[in-house]
Image: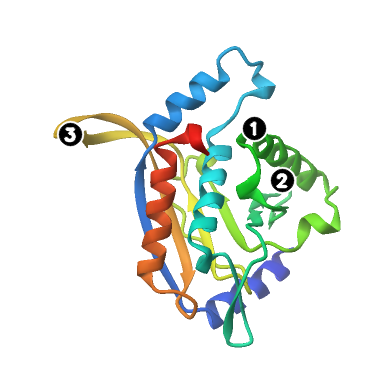
Amino acid sequence: MRRAIANLMSRSKREIPHYYLSTTNDFAAAGEWLHRVNRGRPPADRMVPAALLLKAAAVAAHEVPSLNGYWQNNGFVPGPAVNLGVAVSLREGGLLAPVIHGADTLPTDTLMATLKDLVQRTRRGRLRGSEMSGATLTVTNLGDQGVQTVFGVIHPPQVALVGFGSVTERPWATNGMLGVRPVVTATLAADHRATDAAVGARYLTAVDRLLQKPEEL
């Protein structure tokens, strides 16, 4: 496992000219929406922030399609759909990135159930072959580990990787008033051969905008 990861990540850093961007997003509206949705649900059915973050990442990729696809034969090839690879750490070490196909089209509840099922079966070694191929964009989320910011390494031949940290409370100014708000840091690692930072900035801006209206995701 470590040898395979080492070979792939070494190839990525050797061949792909990465650029990196990050934004800190107000998560208050998303957090309040999650609280309303989860009210009255049993713990096993409650939605976690990761599902909302994945849905925002997928919809933003649909809006900024030049980050959703592959670098092949010295050119960018758009992905046929928004197929999110989700980095999952394994209990014995290493990681895999099973794929949620058409993630931007899934209702958030369905995405949550799919994510939960994939993580469980990934760690049990019960993935199907179709769930291990076809990713057009990978997301890594280390929020449950307490990490505030994660900058990932692109999984070739993809051209971008999105990272999310934990939702934490920080001082935040809104309309000139300083208070404490829940915030989350989103990062982007992107292939400079395929896009420039202005495109990456549009993507992260889209993620932030989508998180402000979670009921529309």
> Quarter holding the N terminus?
bottom right
Q: Is residue 112 left or right of residue 168?
A: right
Q: Position of residue 37 (x, y in %)?
A: 55, 22
Counting other residues with Cα less than 10 Å from the Cα at mark 3, is it few (<14), some (14-19), or many (20 or more)?
A: few
Left or right, residue 176 beside residue 35: left
Q: For the residues labelled 3 and 1, say whether their Cβ atoms are less than 8 Å apart.
A: no
Rendered position, 30 above or below 129: above
Dot label at residue 2:
none
User: Separation of disc 1 and disc 2 at Cα?
Assistant: 26 Å
Is 44 drawn above or below residue 13 in the view shown?
A: above
Asked where in the image residue 78 lies, by quadrant, the reply is bottom right
**Residue closest to the far top:** 40
- First of labels 1, 2 by sequence position: 2
Label 2 sits on a secondary structure element that is loop
Q: Which mark is residue 175?
A: 3
Three-letter code, disc 3: Asn
Q: CA distance from mark 3 to mark 1?
A: 33 Å
